Amino acid sequence: MISAQAWADAQRLWDFQRMGHEPRPCSVAIGLGSHDLGVADTTADLYHRGMMPLIVFTGATSRTTRERMPRGEAEHYRERALQLGVPADAILVEPQARNTAENIQFSRMLLKERNVPVSSVLLVSKPYEERRAYATARKVWPEAEWVSVSTPMAMAEYVESIGDARLVIDMLVGAQQRLMIYPQQGFMIEQQVPDDVGSAYERLRDAGFVSRLALDAAEPQ
């Protein structure tokens, strides 16, 4: 049973993670691999809206995806986008990255190898990781202009789509923790965290929503 306070605190973290960036035409889109195929759906929709000519899907597998996405997150995203009508020649696959920093770093290397000029990037992530993804991208690839977007949906709608409220809250807590500790490790740019967001994070952490916390702050996850 999740308490009313926990729901309210999770909503505060959710709201803070949303960047409020409006999608606009960019040189390329990078879809960050995860358990959520909605990232691929949203990236495909942005392609069909003419927001970018090229997509990079990036990601290997993780403990939450190795069974459901055995061919790798990026490859499953590519297959989903093809089903949604994105042409194969508009998709590049980066299948090695295992954390957000590597997603950006390896995608950048791939685009350079393909001689793709990039000045701006539509960064597509899960709804509760827009800010974390943005902060990482700005650190790893500061020369690019970043627009951080995700599937436009409310937290309750997202929880229903995933089917596991506790998992979603755990992931919100993990994303918030990384926003606060990774800048000191050099993995992200600093993001100012309002006091009420920090308090919401602490209450959820102390209540046991800890399965997605970074155990070793010296290694990006």
Image (spheres, rainbow, N blue to C red):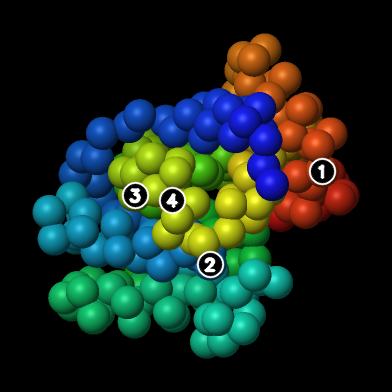
User: Percent from the top left, x then y, of residue 56?
Assistant: 37, 65
Foreground mark, 3 or 4, reads: 4
- Disc 4: CA contacts within 10 A as few (<14), some (14-19) or many (>=20): some
Q: Nearer the viewer, residue 139 or 84?
A: 84
Assess whether mark 4 and mark 1 are in contact (beta carbons under 8 angstroms).
no
Q: Earlier in the sequence, mark 1 or mark 4?
A: 4
Q: Residue at x 58, y 59 (%)?
A: 164
Indicate which disc, 3 or 1, sits on the residue closer to the N terminus. 3
Q: Do the residues bearing badges 1 and 2 touch, measured as CB atoms within 8 Å? A: no
From this viewpoint, is residue 186 visible? no
Marks 3 and 1, how far apart in space? 28 Å
- Residues packed near mark 2 inside 10 Å, few (<14), some (14 to 19) or many (20 plus): some
- Gap in angstroms between the C-alphas marked 2 and 3: 14 Å
Q: Which residue is mark 2?
A: 35
Rounded to the nearest whole Å, what is the CA distance between mark 2 and mark 4? 13 Å
Q: Which residue is mark 1?
A: 208
Q: Nearer the viewer, mark 2 or mark 4?
A: 4
The amino acid marked with disc number 4 is Tyr
Q: Nearer the viewer, residue 158 or 74?
A: 158
* Residue for point 59% across, 52% down: 165
Which type of secondary structure does the marked residue at label 4 adopt? helix
Disc 3 to disc 4, how far (Cα)?
9 Å
Instruction: Return the disc, 3 or 4, that comes first in the chain's sequence.
Output: 3
The secondary element bearing badge 2 is classed as loop
Q: For the residue labelled by badge 3, is the local secondary structure a helix, a strand or a loop?
A: loop
Position of residue 80 relative to residue 131, above or below, is below
| Residue that numbered label 3 is attached to | 151
| Residue type at the position of mark 3 | Thr
Identify which amino acid the numbered label 1 is placed on. Answer: Gly
- The residue labelled by disc 4 is 158
Q: Are marks 3 and 4 in contact (CB under 8 Å)?
A: yes
